[in-house]
């Protein structure tokens, strides 16, 4: 059970798909992990449970930062919890493990993404945060560092893979699940069809976990 105040994204199927991928990834113990877009801190907790010696969590939401800090402390995890845009807050720091369940839901142009909607709205292609993350990962990862990122197939996993590989990282899809649309996608189904992001009548989406390894020094 995780404490989640109003306005904080609740762990859902995408979170647990990434946790499963983490448990199967064979991550060396003792490293420094960062949970980007932490929300409740679920992934920060999972990183500690799978052997990270140090954990950092980052989110733009004050409520999320408070939630992540509390959920870690209740489990005896002395995580460093930071508020702000991850690229700015983390600066030139690097980590052995990067975990991310970023906003990835496509949103119509002009959508007013405030409050909890910041946890999912990510521009018209769903890639506003994903593109930033792909650009930052070569710096965020230490040599031999590993990143695990979860997002919807609606946000174009091939683009994620291409961007990571172009930056010298080894990248592959390591987990996948097909799930029904949640409330946000159901409300946007007509727009998604009109935008060509889903097929007519489609009400299921694929979730993917992409692993990126920094293999260059």
Image (cartoon, helix red, strand yellow):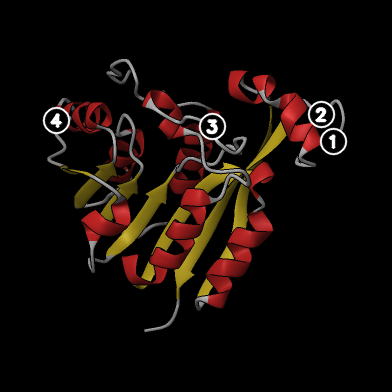
Q: Secondary structure at mark 4?
A: helix
The answer to whether residue 12 is above or below residue 183 is below
Q: CA distance from mark 4 to mark 2?
A: 42 Å
Q: Which mark is residue 108?
A: none
User: Would residue 59 be found to the left or right of residue 150 on screen?
Assistant: left
Instruction: Check disc 3: other Cα within 10 Å, few if <14, some if 14-19, many if 20+.
Output: few
Q: CA distance from mark 2 to mark 3?
A: 22 Å
User: Would residue 80 be found to the left or right of residue 190 on screen?
Assistant: left
Residue that carries the numbered disc 2 in the rendered image: 202
User: Would residue 122 be found to the left or right of residue 58 on screen?
Assistant: right
Residue furthest toward the top? Answer: 6
Report if residue 25 is visible in the image.
no
Q: Which mark is residue 73?
A: 4
Picture residue at 23% right of the left edge, 64% below the top: 91
Instruction: Check disc 2: other Cα within 10 Å, few if <14, some if 14-19, many if 20+.
Output: some
Q: Secondary structure at mark 3?
A: loop
Q: CA distance from mark 2 to mark 1?
A: 5 Å
Residue furthest toward the front? Answer: 110
Residue 18 lies, in percent from the top left, at 49, 42
Picture residue at 28% right of the left edge, 16% below the top: 5
Q: Nearer the viewer, mark 4 or mark 1?
A: 1
Q: Nearer the viewer, residue 129 or 142?
A: 129
Q: Secondary structure at mark 2?
A: loop
Do the numbered discs 1 and 3 sit on residues whose CB atoms are within 8 Å? no
Residue that carries the numbered disc 3 in the rendered image: 111
Label located before the other in sequence (4 or 1):
4
């Amino acid at each position: 059970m995780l404490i989640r105040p109003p306005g904080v994204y609740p762990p859902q199927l995408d979170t647990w798909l990434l946790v499963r991928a983490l448990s199967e990834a064979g991550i060396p113990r003792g490293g420094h992990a960062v949970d980007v877009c932490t929300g409740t801190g679920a992934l920060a907790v999972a990183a500690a449970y799978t052997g990270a010696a140090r954990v950092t969590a980052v989110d733009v939401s004050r409520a999320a930062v408070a939630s992540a800090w509390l959920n870690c402390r209740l489990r005896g995890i002395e995580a460093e919890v930071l508020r702000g845009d991850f690229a700015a807050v983390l600066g030139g720091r690097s980590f052995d493990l990067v975990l991310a369940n970023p906003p990835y839901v496509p949103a119509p142009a002009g959508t007013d993404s405030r409050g909890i909607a910041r946890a999912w709205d990510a521009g018209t292609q769903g890639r506003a945060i994903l593109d930033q993350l792909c650009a930052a990962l070569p710096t965020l990862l230490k040599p031999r560092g590993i990143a695990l990122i979860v997002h919807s197939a609606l946000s174009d996993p091939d683009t994620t893979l291409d961007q990571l590989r172009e930056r010298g990282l080894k990248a592959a899809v390591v987990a996948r699940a097909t799930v029904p649309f949640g409330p946000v996608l159901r409300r946007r189904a007509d727009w998604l069809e009109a935008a060509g992001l889903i097929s007519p009548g489609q009400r299921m989406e694929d979730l993917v976990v992409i692993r990126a390894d920094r293999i260059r020094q």
